[in-house]
Image (cartoon, rainbow, N blue to C red):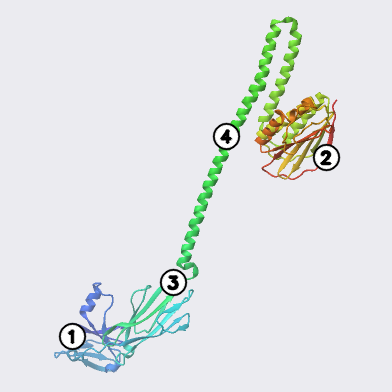
C-alpha cells in the first residue's frame, strides 16, 4: 500500500484508505483478527486507474483531505482532483480468477510442467516458478499466495508472479499457488506442480541400510576382535602360568632327584666314616666325589632356570662348554662346527633344559657304549628351526632307528651299544624332543658310527648363518 494519507469508515464497518498507490477497502473485523493473531493476513480491495481514479496518489498536505458525506458517500482528494465512492452501490463480488503456472526452471533450465510428475536430478541449487492469473478484471492487480508443500508454508507474493527456492533436500514436493482478483475474491484451488528431487546414491535408503549394516558389522568385528585379543591375552597368561608351574615342578623334581639323592649319599658316607675310622680316607674321597657331582647338578639347575640364558647363543655356549669338558675327561677328541656369531633368537627355558638333557644322554651313551675316539658336535641354522647333530666314529649299532627312529635293538653283537636304540634311551630322547615340539632322528651302521640329530622348531624365524669348523682335542 505504501503511505496511508487518508482514512474513512463507511456504514458497513469497513475502512477506506487513501494511499499513494490508490484507494483500498479493508474490513475492520479482518484487521482486528490479524491484530489478535487469529489471522496471518488481511484481504482487501484495491482501486486504481481502471476504476476511475484520475491519479493513484491521494493528497496529504492539508486537512481534511477526505470526508464522510451525510448521504453515506466517501470523498477523497488526489493530486489531480476529488473522487467519491458510494459504498452502498458497490457491485457484487466478481468470480475468482483462474491460476496458471506458466513454467518451472531448475538452475536456469526450463522444465515442462504439463507432465503428471517431474523428476529432478540431485545437486541443483535454484528452483524458480512463474505463474499468472487468468482474469481481465484483476489485471495486474491480482494478488498471489504460494507454498511448497514439504518445504515451506504459505507465503504472500502480493502482485509478484514468481517464486524462488534454493537447494531442496531430496523428497517429493507440491508447489501450490492461489490468486485473488481486485475484489479480494480468492481462488483457493489454484494451480499445482508436483515434482520429486532425487537423492544422491549416498542419500538413498538402501545406502543407509547398507552403511548401517557395514558399521554394525565393523563394530561387531571390532568387539569380537577385542574379545579374541582379551581371550588370547588371558590364554597367554595361563600358558605362562602353566610354564612357570612346569618349571617349578621340574626344579622340584631335579632338586629331589639330584640334590636330594646327593645329600643323602653324603650323609650316609659321613655316617660310615664316623662309625668305621679305618675307611675314613676312602669315604672322604667318595664324599668329595659326591659333592662335586652335587655341585655340577646344582650348576645345571641354576643354568636351566636363569632367564638370561634363554637365547640360542646362551644355549650353545653352555652346551659346547659342557661337551668339551665331558669328552676331555672321557679322553675323547671333540670337534665342533658352530657359527661364529649366533643370533639372539629366544629359546625357552623348557626347550633349553630338555635339549641339554637329551644331549647329555647322547654323550653318556657314546662314552659308555660306542667305543669311539672322536665326536663331532654340529649346529645347523635354518629360517624356522635349528638342528644339533652329535656324531661319533664308534662301532655303531646292529639295528638303529634310522629316520624317525622306528625299530628295536636286538641286544646282541654290540651289547650295551644298543641301549640308545632299544631300552629307555631312545624313548627318553623322543619324549624330551616331543615335549618341546622337536624331532629326534638316529642314523647308524655297524662299524661306521652313529649320528643323532636333534631338531628344535622356532617360533621366531631366523636367517641362516655361515658355519666354520673348530677342533677341540682331548688333553
What residue is pinned by disc 1? 10
Q: Which quadrant is home to the N terminus?
A: bottom left
Q: Would residue 32 appear left or right of 300 to someone viewing this image?
A: left
What residue is at 28 percent from the left and 75 percent from the top?
Answer: 40
Q: Quadrant of residue 358?
A: top right
Q: Earlier in the sequence, mark 2 or mark 4?
A: 4
Q: Is residue 446 above or below residue 467?
A: above
Quick check: 295 above or below 80?
A: above
Left or right: residue 159 versus residue 437 is: left
Q: Nearer the viewer, residue 97 or 337?
A: 337
Nearer the N terminus, badge 4 or badge 3? 3
Which residue does the image show at 56% across and 38% down from the upper left? Answer: 237
Circle 3 or circle 2, nearest the eye: 2
Mark in front: 4 vs 1? 4
**CA separation, marks 4 and 3?**
62 Å
Q: Residues within 10 Å of mark 4 (few under 14, many from 20)?
A: few
Task: Say which element carries label 2.
Answer: strand
Which numbered disc, 4 or 3, marks the residue closer to the eye? 4
Q: CA distance from mark 2 to mark 1?
A: 127 Å
**Res 308 visible:** no
What residue is drawn where x is 69% and y is 34%? 430
- Residue 170, numbered label: 3
Which residue does the numbered mark 2 point to in the structure image? 468
Judged left or right of residue 252, residue 393 is right
Tell which tag, 3 or 1, sits nearer the viewer.
Answer: 3
- Of residue 404 and residue 359, the one placed in the foreground of this image is 404
Amino acid at each position: 500500500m505504501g503511505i496511508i494519507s487518508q482514512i474513512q469508515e463507511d456504514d458497513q464497518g469497513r475502512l477506506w484508505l487513501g494511499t499513494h498507490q490508490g484507494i483500498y477497502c479493508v474490513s475492520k473485523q479482518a484487521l482486528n483478527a490479524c491484530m489478535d493473531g487469529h489471522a496471518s493476513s488481511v484481504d482487501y480491495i484495491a482501486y486504481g486507474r481502471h476504476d476511475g481514479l484520475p491519479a493513484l496518489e491521494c493528497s496529504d498536505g492539508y486537512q481534511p483531505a477526505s470526508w464522510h458525506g451525510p448521504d453515506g458517500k466517501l470523498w477523497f482528494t488526489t493530486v489531480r482532483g476529488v473522487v467519491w465512492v458510494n459504498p452502498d452501490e458497490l457491485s457484487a463480488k466478481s468470480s475468482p480468477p483462474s491460476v496458471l503456472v506458466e513454467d518451472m526452471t531448475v538452475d536456469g533450465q526450463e522444465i515442462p510442467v504439463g507432465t503428471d510428475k517431474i523428476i529432478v536430478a540431485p545437486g541443483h541449487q535454484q528452483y524458480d516458478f512463474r505463474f499468472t492469473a487468468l482474469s481481465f478484471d484483476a489485471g495486474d492487480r491480482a494478488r498471489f499466495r504460494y507454498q511448497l508443500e514439504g518445504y515451506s508454508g504459505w507465503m504472500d507474493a502480493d502482485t509478484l508472479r514468481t517464486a524462488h527456492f534454493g537447494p531442496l533436500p531430496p523428497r517429493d514436493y507440491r508447489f501450490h499457488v492461489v490468486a485473488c482478483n481486485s475484489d479480494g475474491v480468492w481462488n483457493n484451488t489454484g494451480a499445482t506442480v508436483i515434482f520429486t528431487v532425487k537423492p544422491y546414491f549416498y542419500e538413498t535408503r538402501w545406502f543407509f541400510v547398507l552403511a548401517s549394516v557395514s558399521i554394525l558389522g565393523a563394530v561387531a568385528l571390532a568387539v569380537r576382535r577385542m574379545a579374541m585379543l582379551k581371550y588370547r591375552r588371558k590364554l597367554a597368561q595361563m600358558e605362562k602360568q602353566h610354564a612357570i608351574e612346569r618349571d617349578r615342578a621340574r626344579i622340584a623334581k631335579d632338586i629331589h632327584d639330584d640334590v636330594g639323592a646327593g645329600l643323602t649319599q653324603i650323609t650316609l658316607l659321613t655316617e660310615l666314616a664316623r662309625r668305621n675310622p679305618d675307611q675314613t680316607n676312602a669315604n672322604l674321597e667318595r664324599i668329595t666325589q659326591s659333592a662335586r657331582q652335587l655341585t655340577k647338578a646344582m650348576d645345571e639347575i641354576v643354568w636351566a632356570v636363569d632367564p638370561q640364558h634363554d637365547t640360542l647363543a646362551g644355549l650353545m655356549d653352555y652346551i659346547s662348554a659342557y661337551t668339551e669338558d665331558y669328552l676331555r675327561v672321557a679322553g675323547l677328541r671333540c670337534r665342533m662346527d658352530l657359527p661364529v656369531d649366533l643370533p639372539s633368537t629366544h629359546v625357552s627355558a623348557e626347550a633349553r633344559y630338555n635339549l641339554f638333557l637329551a644331549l647329555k644322554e647322547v654323550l653318556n651313551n657314546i662314552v659308555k657304549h660306542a667305543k669311539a675316539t672322536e665326536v663331532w658336535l654340529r649346529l645347523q641354522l635354518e629360517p624356522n628351526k635349528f638342528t644339533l647333530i652329535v656324531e661319533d666314529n664308534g662301532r655303531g649299532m646292529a639295528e638303529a632307528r634310522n629316520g624317525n627312529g622306528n625299530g628295536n635293538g636286538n641286544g646282541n653283537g654290540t651289547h650295551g651299544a644298543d641301549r640308545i636304540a632299544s631300552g629307555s634311551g631312545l624313548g627318553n630322547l623322543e619324549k624330551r624332543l616331543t615335549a618341546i615340539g622337536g624331532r629326534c632322528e638316529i642314523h647308524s651302521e655297524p662299524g661306521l658310527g652313529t649320528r643323532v640329530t636333534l631338531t628344535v622348531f622356532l617360533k621366531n624365524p631366523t636367517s641362516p648363518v655361515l658355519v666354520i669348523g673348530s677342533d677341540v682335542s682331548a688333553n
